Amino acid sequence: MLRLRLRESVVSRLLSSPFTSTSAISPLLRLLSASASASASAAPSTFAVEEYLVDTCGLTRPQALKASKKLSHLKSPANPDAVLAFLAGLGLSGADAAAVVAKDPLFLCAKVERTLVPVVDGLTGLGLSRSEIGGLVSLVHNRFRCRSIVSKMQYYLPLFGSLDNLLRMLQRSSYLLSSDLDKVVRPNVVFLRECGLGDCDIAKLCIPVPRILITNPERIRAMVACAERLGVPRGSRMLRHALQAVAFLNEDKIAAKVDYLKNTFRWYDAEACIAVRKYPGVLRKSKESLKHRSEFLCSKVGLEPVYIAHRSEILSYSMVGRLRPRYYVIKFLKQNGLLACDLSLYSAIKMTDKVFVEKLICPHKEAAPHLAEDYAAACKGEVPTNFRFI
C-alpha cells in the first residue's frame, strides 16, 4: 500500500507540472506497470481481491464484497495498481477513485495504455482539461473505458453548447454515451431541426428529459404528431415545451388530463385547447396542484375560466412563492389606495422578483413600513392574516 501511495504521488506531481504533456502518461505508466508486474511475480500467487479493494482502493467491506464477485478472475494487483495510478494522475482523490471502483469494479481491469490513455489524449484534443476529464470519469465511469466516448463527446459538445450543459445531461442519464449515434441520436437531431428547433432548443429540451434524444426515432415523430394534435405546430416557439409535456405519455393519459382540466377549471373544449397550446406544461401538473390553483384563482381571486385559459402560464407559478404573496400585496395596496394604476394580478405575477419589489414594495416604505416584512413572510408560506398598515 505504501508503494501505491508513492506511485500515485509521483504521477500526480509529474502530471501537474506545466512541462508534462498528456502523452507523457504512457511511458510513465509503462514504468509503473513493469514495477507492479515485478511486485506481483515476487508475491504469493493468490491475490486477495476483497482485501485489495478495502486496503488499497478504500471501499467499505460491503462494497468490496459486492465488487469482488466481478473481479474473481484477477490474479495480481498489476493492472489495478496501474489504473489507480492513472486515476490519481487525473486528479481524483482516494475517495473519488473508490467511488468509481464501487460503481464500476471492472474499471480496474481496463487497459491503461491501450484504452484509457488514448481516451485522455482524445478528450484533451477536444479542449478538456485534466480536471474536467477526471470529473467525467467520476460521472460516467464504465462509459469512460470505451474509446468511442471521444467521438461521441466530439458530437455532443457543439450540440449542447458547452461542457457544463453536457455534464448536466449526463448527470441525469449517462446512457447518452452508449447510444448509437448514427442509428438513433443523429436521426433524432436532424428531425428536430427539421421541426424548427435549433441546437439551443434541443439542449433545453433534452437536459431535463435525456431519454428524448436516445429514444427510437419513430417515437420522436409520434411525440411531434401528438404536439400538433394539441395545437402546437412545427416551427412554434412552444414546440419544445409541448414535447417535454407529452414525452412518453400515451394518448389515453393525455386525454384524461385534458378532461380533468376541463372539469377543474370549467373550460369548454376550445378553452382547454387554448390553455394547453399556450402552456403545454399544464399536462405535467399533478391533479392536486391544479385543484389548489383552481380553488385559489377561481374561488378566492375571482378570475373567470376563459381569462385563465388565455393566460394559462399563470398555472406554472408557485402558489407559495408567487401567486398568494403577490395577490395579497395587490389586494392590500388597492384596499388602502396605494395603487395608482389598475394593475392585474397576472401582470404582477409575471414581473421578476426584483421588479416587483422595486415597483410595488419599495415605494410604500413610509406609508406601509411592514409591507416588505409581510411580503417576505408570505413568500415563505407564513401568510399573515392581514397585511399590517400603519
Image (cartoon, rainbow, N blue to C red):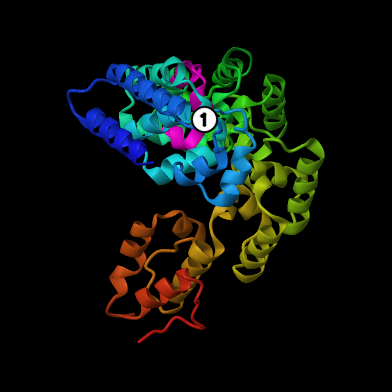
Tell me which residue sits at (66%, 47%) in the image.
284
* Location of residue 244 in the rendering, given as x and y in whole percent from the top left corner: 61, 37
Quarter of the rendering occupied by the N terminus: top left
Residue 215 x %, y %:
66, 26
Along the viewing direction, whichever of 253 and 182 lies nearer the viewer = 182
User: Any magenta on residue 160?
Assistant: no
Furthest residue in direction bottom, as rendered: 390
Residue drawn at 34 percent across, 26 percent down: 128
Left or right: 336 as drawn, with respect to 206: left
Within-10-Å neighbours for mark 1: few <14, some 14–19, many 20+: many
41 lies above or below 245: above
Please, is residue 85 above or below residue 290 in the view? above
In this picture, is 61 found above or below 146? below
Q: Which residue is mark 1?
A: 107
- The residue located at (40%, 64%) in the rendering is 341
Residues rendered magenta in the picture: 136-153
Task: Name the quadrant containing residue 308.
Answer: bottom right
**Magenta span: helix, strand or loop, mainly?**
helix
Q: State the residue in front, 311 or 5.
A: 5
Q: Is residue 320 left or right of residue 134?
A: right
Element carrying mark 1:
helix
Residue 237: in sight, yes or no?
A: no
Q: Is residue 100 left or right of residue 5?
A: right
**Can the viewer see residue 218?**
yes
Q: At 62% across and 64% down in the image, what residue appears?
A: 297
Q: Is residue 363 above or below residue 95?
A: below
Quadrant showing the C terminus: bottom left
**160 or 33, nearer to the observer:** 33
* Amino acid under disc 1: Phe
Indicate the position of residue 47 as horizontal and vertical percent values.
54, 34
Relative image position of residue 152 (x, y in whole percent): 49, 19
Q: Quadrant of residue 73?
A: top right
